[in-house]
Image (tube, rainbow, N blue to C red):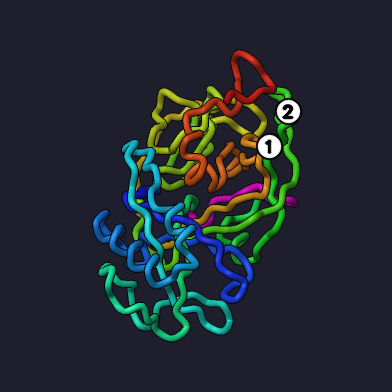
Amino acid sequence: MSVKLFCFLLILSAQVLAAVIPLRCKTSGDSLDAQQAVRRRAWASRCFPHHRGAINFHSQMLDEATNKLSEGYPTFAHIEDNGVISNPENWFAPTDEQADCTLPNNYFLITYCAAGCYMPKERVWFQNSDVEIGIAHEQQLSQVMTLDSNFDYPNLKFSSSDVESYITDLVPGWQDILEITALSGGSIRVTTNHPLVDGEGRMRSAHSLTTQDSLMRSDGKLDPIISVDSKKYFGKVYNLEVTNQNLSEKIIVAEGYLNGTLYYQNEGLKDLNRIILRTNVIPNSLVN
């Protein structure tokens, strides 16, 4: 997705939420420039010393579209008794380091947001069938099919993996979407920095793909790209992360094509453009 503003993940304490809830800041209205982000971090570090480690760890993020570091900052929201996150006070945390530390009632530091990826109706291969990602998020499906590291290209092998977390926007907003159509007639609609596996087995951001490239299908065949069209969409977008640690096992299938999980938009930005599946030299290997 078009992420001129990067945000980051925070694991909430058990007293607040029982699970990780990754969200995005972009459409929540809590949009800061670099100087404001630095001041927000300073305020949060002073007011919430028990979060200083996480705040410092997520202070910067690589924007792979520009190859520049972007400032990160925490965001806050109201958590209702039923767990719903909202902002009824239309309140945003200060960007003045010396501001009052008092939060509105039932407001908490909820997340360092991350980017979403899929339109809600894009179908992802879960354990039993292809399911629209929006429905999977709503139902909290716990098993998704991922590439098995014990594959022999082009005979790809998949196995069921545990979903660690889902990600979506805090509120709906305008999204920059790419609709990528391939020669077979297949297509996928994703946000501009969504990670996809190209014909060379490299993990690539969607915005870097052209009609000179191919997508890789789940059967190992290459599907040449015939068009990449930019579109606007109002709503939420989604992605997920799995518990697997192996890079190849963080590859899932959406609309029949190999895609990266949320990892490749956060910690794994450094792994974009790495050959994850070597398709033409040494099958069944990863290149570090």
**Residue 137 position (above or below residue 106):** above
Q: Is residue 230 left or right of residue 159?
A: left
Q: Which residues are magenta?
A: 119-128
**Image location (x, y in percent) of residue 174:** 34, 59
Whether 45 is drawn above or below 242: the answer is below
Q: Residue 131 vs residue 90: left or right?
A: right
Q: In the rendering, which numbered label is found on residue 278?
A: none
Amino acid at pointer 1 = Leu
Q: Name the residue nearer the viewer: 33 or 250.
A: 33
Give me the C-alpha separation between circle 2 and circle 1: 8 Å
> Magenta stretch: residue 61 in it?
no
Q: Tell me the number on the disc at residue 151.
A: 2
The quarter of the picture where the C terminus appears is top right
Query: In the image, what residue occupies the spot 48% across and 62% down?
Result: 23
Q: Name the residue located 51 percent from the left edge and 44 percent from the top edge.
A: 267
Q: Position of residue 156 (x, y in %)?
A: 70, 30
What is the crowding at mark 2: few (fewer than 14 residues within 10 Å), some, or many (at least 20)? some
- Is 120 within the magenta? yes
Q: Nearer the viewer, residue 170 or 228?
A: 170
Disc 2 marks a residue whose amino acid type is Phe
Answer yes or no: is residue 181 visible.
Answer: no
**Closer to us: 48 or 267:** 48
Please indicate, yes or no, whether residue 174 appears anywhere in the rendered image.
Answer: yes
Q: Looking at the image, is 70 positioned above or below residue 120? A: above
Residue 192 located left or right of residue 251: left
For disc 1, the neighbor class at 10 Å (few under 14, some 14 to 19, many from 20) is many
Classify mark 1: helix, strand or loop: strand
Element class at badge 2? loop
Would you name the residue on which mark 1 appears? 147
Asked if disc 2 and disc 1 are in contact, CB closer than 8 Å, the reply is yes
Residue at 60% across, 32% down: 217
